[in-house]
Each structure stands twice: as C-alpha cells, then as structure tokens.
Amino acid sequence: MKKTFMTIILALAAATALAQDTKPAAGGVVIEEADPVICTAGEIKIRQSEFEAAIKTLPEQYQQFAAGTGKKQFAEDFLRMKILAVEGFKNNLQNDADVVKQLNLMRENLVASAQVKKLESSLTLDEAAVKKMYDDNKKDYEQVSARHILIAFKGSPAAQAGKKELTEDEAKAKAEDIRKQLVAGADFAELAKKESDDTGSGSRGGDLGTFGHGQMVPEFESAAFGTKVGELSPVVKTQYGFHILKVEKRDLTAYESVKAGLEKNLRQTKLQEAIEALKDKAKPTYSEAYFPPPPPPAPAAELPTLTPPRTRRVRHAD
C-alpha cells in the first residue's frame, strides 16, 4: 500500500501543477478558517480542501483507506510530492521538454475527461427505449426454481468418497430407475436426501433455489428451461453425472428490478456512439508507413479431394 500510494502521488504531481499556481495569490487574499492549514513544511502549506481533493483523485479502492486509517500515510506521501515539486520548480524542470510533453498530455486527458462528463450529462434516455431493451432480451431475465437428484459416475467431480463407484451405464440406469419411482409417485425430496450425490442440495431435498441463464452448465440449463412447471425432465447427463430435474416455478425478473442497470447500459452505449460520431466527423487518416495494414490471412491448407476411385469394368467373355 505504501509503495502504491507514493506511485499515485507522484503521478498526481503533474495534475497538481496544472490545477494551481505555485506562487502565493497577490493582494493578501484571506482564506476562510473553514479551510484550515493541516500540514506545513518550510514554505509549503497544505490546506484541508486541497488534501481532500487529492484523495478524490485516487482510485476508488484507495479512497476509503486514505480518508480513514491511512490518512496520515497519505498525507506524508502527498507532502513528499509537494517537496519534490518545489525542488523541481526551483530547478526549472517544469520547462523540461519531456515534462512539458507529459503536462500537455495530462492537460488534454483532463479536458477530454471533462468533455466525456459533459456529453454524458447531455444524454437523454427514452423510457420506451429502455423498456424495449428489456423486452428484446427477456430471455436473460428468465428464472426457474427447481430441484434435482444427481447420480455421479466414476471420475465425476461429485463422486462421493467411500461410496460405490458406478460406471456411466450403471449411473444412468440408476437415474432412470429413480425417475420411474418419481413418476409412480415417490416423494422427490425424500429420494434426493437418500440418493443424490449433490450433498449440498440433497440435504435440502434437492432444492437448488432460483437461478437464471448462464448460471448452470449448458446441458443442465437447457433441461431446466425446457421443462414445464410441475414436470420432471428426462435424465440429463453433465460432467457431474446424471440428473433428474423437477421444475417448481418459472418467472421473469421484474422490469423495475433491472431498470437502473438497463439505463446505465443504454447510457453507456449512447455515450460511446456520441464519441464515435465525433471521431467519424473528424475523418481520421493514419500513416500507412507507421501503421502498415495487417498481413493477409494465410491460405487454408488444401485438403486432399476425397473422390471415389473409378470403377474398373471387368469384361466377361461371351
């Protein structure tokens, strides 16, 4: 954390130089006591507002630490940056060619970030467009509640230590037999507790709770979303073994529950489109000498033509 803070602080040095004048303000401007000096070192004075503004420039994962238990550590690093900056100005390093290039780049980057915020604030979202995004992707919001019984075979990640290992054929036959028992009226929860090799859900009668698309392995997901409520799936094979599923409920995540996320995604899409439109309007061209076109793809290896051999006619004597 210490090294990371110092790296970040040094990166802030240029931004600080852009944001403030190094000379004291003329005219003896009185600064409110509400913004007290919290650290001094020779000619350097660090005020609370400046320090807290610097904290806000940190990545989010560091801000809480720097404003809390790491406040003194951050202050020490911030002061080191200030001392180094003062010495650098004394040595006229602000006019060093490389420093000027970096300052200009940082200046453009800061202005570009401000322009992005301005573009984003000007975007308007149509409620109908947000709802259409939801309707067009309803599959993503489908959910099912289901139970299952798993019969593992030898080599499965779910195989139970100390339990007789079954071949794939034996595991499938056992799963088919359990399904027949369920069709005949056996209690799903009781059989799951007794037979399922998924011990986690088995202890709950096979209950998997509610899940959506992309949360289960593909074969399992296909069976879960393809089985009607109240019915049993066929025996399904996955890498874990053979499953029998019972779907108990199917529903959709409500639009209001995902609306905020949809708005965020749509806003991001519109922002990206606005930025691309600005780029397209500028009609950029690139030096082919510096950015050579990519080489053409290598030709696919020619495969031998599989043609049947000619039939050899056999002449028969009359």
Image (spheres, rainbow, N blue to C red):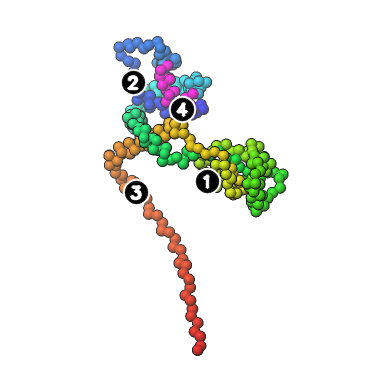
User: Which residue matches tag 2?
Assistant: 21
Can residue 155 be spotted in the picture? Answer: no
Instruction: Kindly state the secondary structure of the residue where label 3 is placed.
Output: loop
Residue 186 on the magenta span: no
Q: Residue furthest front?
A: 184
305 vs 46: above or below = below
Determine if the magenta segment contains residue 58: yes
The amino acid type found where label 3 is placed reads Pro
Q: Nearer the viewer, mark 3 or mark 4?
A: 4
Name the residue: 59% across, 42% down: 246
In space, the residues marked 3 and 4 are separated at their CA atoms by 39 Å
Would residue 31 be visible to someone looking at this image?
yes
Q: Name the disc covering residue 60, or none.
A: 4
Whole-angstrom CA distance, mark 3 to mark 2, is 44 Å
Residue receiving disc 3:
292
Residue stretch in magenta: 48-64
Q: Residues within 10 Å of mark 3 (few under 14, many from 20)?
A: few
Quick one: label 3 or label 1, which is nearer the N terminus?
1
What x and y, as percent, mark residue 203?
A: 66, 37
- Name the residue beneath numbered marker 1: 226
Mark 1 in CB contact with mark 4 (< 8 angstroms) = no
